[in-house]
């Protein structure tokens, strides 16, 4: 087990809210990592007084003081890291990705940029490419995306199925995804595959029956694309209820391409999150504000499809909990960059930099119903990002610049 003291942190975003500061910002801070958990967080100047460790007179180790929670033995070697006055934030929590797939759709993106609209039907092209890929090819591609996510500061990520749409293909996507994350979502209801277009009922029977049975052992969540061109509200309700009966927790893709019932259905079934939320009525906003359902906004989609961005300000002002996620997928948002989501949310969606950073960390954790990530506090996971910047504002202020200096996942530098 390794023990690391990171000190001289110029600005630490803990997300342990204090009055007027949901980000729980500490200046001149230090964090102690013990194994895969945070052991202590505080002002660097209080290290000697309050902190469980102090520098040994000889050698590089630190040892515990009495009356504290953290008490390593006299011989515990502690690595001391000087953050050089830089900013540190919790690792990003990307609560919405689709990173197990074959092929790409760069041609569709290129056509969109000359005015062709996005259509959900493009999903079927990726389904064909994914079915044609071997398990080894999917795994190798996924490993590349995991490296990409980590390099950009994402330490927790969700992955959806939905590019297989046969029992065997959905099962292998869920299985391969579960090798890299506990947050796997069964999205057999992504679109109706070509072979079932004339018999939607039969496909829904498959999704709510044997496909769900094959995927649920690898999954924590059930999702449905409730949208014109995908699944109707009644079909979506049936699919989500079947998932809940199988022990999965619901989440919904809704109100992406136009107004619809996705948000209200999500609230009705007690979904952890409803994702996209681009086209919302006042009733949708009120229903969300009255619920525990998080509104997860995915600005990579609007960036890549030229649709209007969702109005985060309206949601936050109404009291809705907002998360930001990448929706990394080859059709509507082929980016895994949470810093880009933050920059877009600030520039285009009315969020302050603090709100956007909170939404990309603590907000994502809420959307995944996780209390051990997205927050830097004693007992939470030692998942941290040191920025090559003095404050978190730089994530929006310096868009496109690689500001991720180092990433700790479970207490280990990646
Ligand atoms: O979240 N909305 C549905 N699914 C994806 C798009 C998938 C695709 O176009 O391949 C999304 O945007
Ligand atoms: Fe999605």
Image (spheres, rainbow, N blue to C red):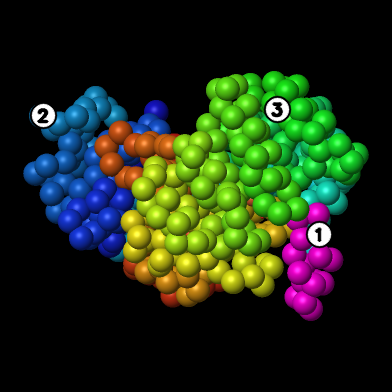
| Label 1 beta carbon less than 8 Å to ligand 1 | yes
Cα gap from disc 1 to disc 2, whole angstroms: 60 Å
Q: Nearer the viewer, residue 195 or 52?
A: 195
Disc 1 designates what residue? 105
Answer yes or no: do the residues labelled 3 and 1 have beta carbons within 8 Å? Answer: no
Judged from this view, the residue extending furthest toward the bottom is 114
Instruction: Provide the residue span drawn in magenta.
Output: 107-121
Question: Is 317 above or below relative to 121?
Answer: below
Please give the label number shown on residue 66. Answer: 2
- The residue shown at (26%, 48%) is 16
Q: Secondary structure at mark 2?
A: loop
Please give the label number shown on residue 275. Answer: none
Residue 113 falls inside the magenta stretch: yes
Classify residue 182 by image quadrant: top right
- The residue shown at (81%, 38%) is 200
Residue 75 in sight = yes
Percent across and percent down for residue 86 are 34, 63
Question: Is 206 above or below relative to 164?
Answer: above
Q: Secondary structure at mark 1?
A: loop
Q: Nearer the viewer, residue 369 or 335?
A: 369
Cα gap from disc 2 to disc 3, whole angstroms: 57 Å
Residue 182 in sight = no
| Label 2 beta carbon less than 8 Å to ligand 2 | no
Q: Residues within 10 Å of mark 1 (few under 14, many from 20)?
A: some
Q: Residues within 10 Å of mark 3 (few under 14, many from 20)?
A: many
């Amino acid at each position: 087990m390794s023990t690391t003291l990171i000190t001289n942190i110029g600005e630490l975003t803990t997300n342990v809210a204090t009055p007027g500061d949901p980000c729980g910002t500490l200046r001149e801070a230090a964090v102690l990592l013990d194994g895969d958990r945070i052991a202590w967080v505080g002002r660097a100047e209080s290290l000697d007084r309050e902190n469980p460790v102090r520098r040994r007179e000889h050698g590089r180790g630190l040892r515990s003081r009495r009356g504290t929670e953290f008490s390593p033995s006299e011989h515990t070697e502690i690595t001391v890291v000087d953050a050089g006055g830089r900013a540190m934030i919790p690792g990003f929590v990307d609560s919405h990705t689709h990173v197990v797939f074959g092929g790409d759709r760069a041609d569709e993106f290129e056509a969109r940029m000359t005015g062709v609209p996005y259509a959900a039907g493009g999903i079927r092209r990726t389904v064909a490419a994914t079915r044609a890929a071997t398990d080894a090819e999917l795994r190798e591609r996924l490993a590349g995306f995991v490296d990409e996510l980590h390099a950009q500061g994402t330490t927790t990520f969700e992955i959806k199925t939905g590019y297989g749409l046969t029992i065997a293909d959905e099962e292998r996507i869920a299985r391969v995804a579960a090798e890299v994350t506990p947050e796997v979502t069964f999205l057999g209801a992504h679109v109706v595959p070509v072979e079932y277009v004339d018999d939607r009922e039969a496909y829904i029977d498959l999704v709510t029956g044997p496909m769900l049975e094959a995927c649920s052992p690898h999954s924590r969540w059930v999702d449905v694309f409730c949208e014109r061109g995908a699944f109707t509200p009644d079909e979506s309700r049936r699919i989500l209820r079947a998932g809940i009966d199988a022990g999965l927790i619901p989440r919904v893709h809704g109100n992406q391409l136009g107004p619809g019932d996705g948000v209200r259905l999500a609230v009705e079934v007690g979904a952890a999150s409803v994702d996209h939320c681009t086209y919302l009525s006042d009733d949708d906003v009120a229903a969300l504000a009255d619920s525990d359902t998080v509104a997860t906004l995915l600005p990579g989609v609007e960036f890549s499809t030229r649709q209007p961005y969702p109005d985060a300000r309206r949601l936050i002002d109404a009291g809705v909990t907002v998360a930001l996620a990448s929706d990394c997928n080859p059709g509507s948002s082929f980016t895994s960059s949470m810093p880009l989501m933050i920059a877009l949310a600030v520039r285009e969606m009315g969020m302050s930099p603090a709100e956007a950073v909170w939404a990309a960390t603590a907000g994502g954790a809420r959307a995944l119903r996780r209390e051990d990530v997205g927050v830097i506090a004693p007992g939470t996971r030692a998942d941290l990002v040191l920025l090559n910047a003095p404050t978190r504002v730089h994530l929006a202020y310096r868009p496109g610049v690689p500001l991720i200096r180092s990433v700790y996942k479970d207490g280990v530098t990646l």
